[in-house]
Image (tube, coloured by chain):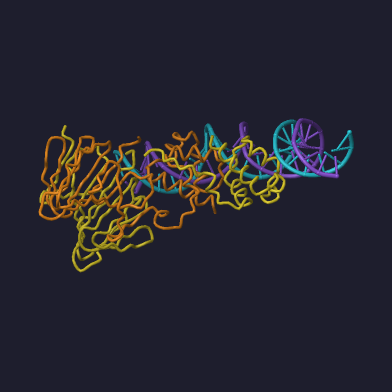
Chain colours: A orange, B yellow, C cyan, D purple
DNA sequence: AAACTTGTTTCACTATATGCAACTTTTTAA
DNA sequence: TTAAAAAGTTGCATATAGTGAAACAAGTTT
């Protein structure tokens, strides 16, 4: 029962990361045969083995033992209804901008989606942000002046931009009404 | 290291509950000699054994693992104006669905953003897709029935879902009018 | 002091996890 | 449709976890 849950999780995460048994075997220093038997619940691996696997998959070992309710999280998805978006504070973010997370998934994910609402009136000039990874922005409502390095790019509703966020950047409202953007950030590997 | 932490926790809880090794042995169906070796970190017990211990101590097995340190987490941009979206064909995609790429960046990127337009009338039942990586979908217009494994999830305009695409999935229009979704796909590491 | 409790360790033995290689199944290529 | 390659499974030999009993080394109690 417990082993079954753990086995399923290992397999799911391995698949999500696109590894074969052999590749995970190389990452964990375990034979692919053993990994197969673990995923098929034919053995009860010792802690040391489970630890190797969690390292190979780059997930905290604890998630194998979470007894979380079987919401979508267990199944591998997380829905965020329009009215249920949670306001968040991203590091380095002014209080004036409104960020709403679009994902309830846990931290071992690549995608970090949220909605940013830009008020009509721009307060004090916000500073530019830069960080590793990759970023994508789609204007859902209103229009935006997107500052990227030394350039400013006008983006209207429906326009989008895909860019390297290591260049200092930020958006600011450009219309008579407030604007709304979908933003996707991907962490560039590890920190 | 990990075993040490677990060992210490077991011993601490056992002491707190006032059990001797022999008593815990009776509760768990394990020999006191073994329990001693586990507490002294001389063996790496399998999950099954750890499970017995957690039951005997009446604690959730997860607490042995709850350290929760999250491991890891040119111009460089490409704008796509609303009218300039390029129609594309994704592999394994029926011709009936309309895909529009949102990125002009070169191919070594993580993010693959596009717009999918679902027609009102569903043609022949499309087959489900599965692939490694991660996926995010936001309904821009209309409503969608999102099929994920054996579940079907109704998503209205503004709703979004973040999910593991290794489970077979697909969306289909659910309203009187056509629907439009933003979809972001991330390749799961290797190719 | 002796008797008792608790925990550690040793021994021979059994049960199970592991690596390796052979095998079967699935996927890809042609 | 085949043949070849890749991914996954399984059999076997070995290493390690697990058992029970008993010996040992503490610390308590009377």
Residue placed most toward the observer, B96 or A155: A155
Residue placed most toward the observer, A33 or D12: A33
Displayed quadrant of residue A147? top left
Asked if D23 appears above or below B97 in the picture, the reply is above
The image shows a total of numbered marks equal to 0
Asked if B122 appears above or below B10 in the picture, the reply is below
- Image position, residue D23 (x, y; %): 81, 33
The residue drawn where x is 44% and y is 34% is: A27
Residue placed most toward the observer, A38 or A184: A184
Displayed quadrant of residue B104? top left
The reply, left or right, for residue B6 in relation to residue C15 is left
- Image position, residue B160 (x, y; %): 28, 56
The reply, left or right, for residue B127 in relation to residue B95 is right
Asked if A107 appears above or below B172 in the picture, the reply is above
Displayed quadrant of residue D25? top right
Position of the C terminus of chain A, as image quadrant, is: top left
- Image position, residue A118 (x, y; %): 19, 51
Residue placed most toward the observer, D5 or B36: B36
- Image position, residue A111 (x, y; %): 31, 46
């Amino acid at each position: 029962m417990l082993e079954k849950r753990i086995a399923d999780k290992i397999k799911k995460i391995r698949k999500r990361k696109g590894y074969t048994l052999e590749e995970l075997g190389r990452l964990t220093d375990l034979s692919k045969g053993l990994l197969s038997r673990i995923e098929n619940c034919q053995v009860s691996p010792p802690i040391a083995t489970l630890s190797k696997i969690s390292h190979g998959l780059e997930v905290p070992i604890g998630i194998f033992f979470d007894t979380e309710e079987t919401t979508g999280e267990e199944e591998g998805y997380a829905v965020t209804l329009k009215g249920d978006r949670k306001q968040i504070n991203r590091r380095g973010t002014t209080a004036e901008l409104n960020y709403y997370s679009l994902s309830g998934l846990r931290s071992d994910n690549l995608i970090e989606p949220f909605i940013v609402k830009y008020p009509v009136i721009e307060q004090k000039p916000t500073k530019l942000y830069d960080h590793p990874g990759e970023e994508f922005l789609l204007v859902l409502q209103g229009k935006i002046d997107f500052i990227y390095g030394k350039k400013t790019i006008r983006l209207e509703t429906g326009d989008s931009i895909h860019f390297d966020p290591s260049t200092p950047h930020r958006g600011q409202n450009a219309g008579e009404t407030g604007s709304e953007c979908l933003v996707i950030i991907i962490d560039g590997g590890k920190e």
